[in-house]
Image (tube, rainbow, N blue to C red):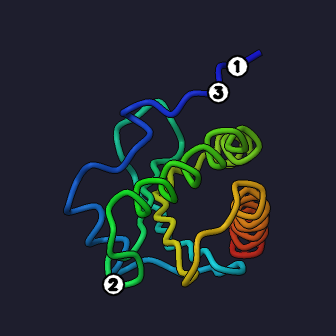
Amino acid sequence: MKKLTLNKDERIKSKKLMDNIFTNGKIIRSGFIRLNYVQIDFDSKYPAKAAFSVPKRIFKRAVKRNLLKRRMREAYRLNKLPLYEFLTINNIKISLLFVYLAKDSKSFSEIENNMLDLVNKLKDKIENSKN
């Protein structure tokens, strides 16, 4: 069984890459989470890099923003393997930015359901763009 970790190499740290996602990326939305993504080649053994964002104008307190980012990271970490397998089979490298858009704090199970829906929509969109 593979370890369900979210290593430093799997996270987006580069400001250049973040700007690229915002300017050239495509958007998928599911409930209260928006996914900005761009297919880009980078040097990593992982097929995807991810970042998580909660807007400061919606949640003023850093404690609440950090809690929601932790919940999103955990939901992604637990459910990333099917996406990684799909990307590896199709030889695709992708950068993902998850943005929390709800005005109130949601439970982990609600966040996880939206993440699963986003991952499935992303796989469908990539599959349709190949054909």
Determine whether 61 is above or below 1 in the image: below
- Within 10 angstroms of label 3, few (less than 14), some, or many (20 or more) residues? few
Q: Which mark is residue 2?
A: 1
Q: How far apart are marks 2 and 1 (CA)?
A: 38 Å
| Residue 14, above or below 36 | above
- Do the CB atoms of the residues marked 3 and 1 lie less than 8 Å apart? yes
Dot 2 falls on a residue whose secondary structure is loop
Q: Which residue does the image show at 28% across and 61% down from the upper left? A: 17
What kind of residue is marked 1?
Lys
Disc 2 or disc 1, which is closer to the eye?
Answer: 2
| Gap between marks 3 and 2 measured at Cα | 32 Å
SS type, badge 1: loop
Pointer 2: what residue? 57
Q: Residues within 10 Å of mark 2 (few under 14, many from 20)?
A: few
Q: Is residue 45 left or right of residue 79?
A: left
Where, quadrant-wise, is the C terminus in this rendering? bottom right
Q: Between 40 and 31, which is closer to the camera in this rendering?
A: 31
Amino acid type shown at disc 3: Leu
Label 1 crowd (10 A; few <14 / some 14-19 / many >=20):
few
Kindly indicate the quadrant of the structure image that contains residue 126. Answer: bottom right
Position of the N terminus, as image quadrant, is top right
Which circle, 3 or 1, is nearer the viewer?
Answer: 3
Q: Mark 3 points at which residue?
A: 4
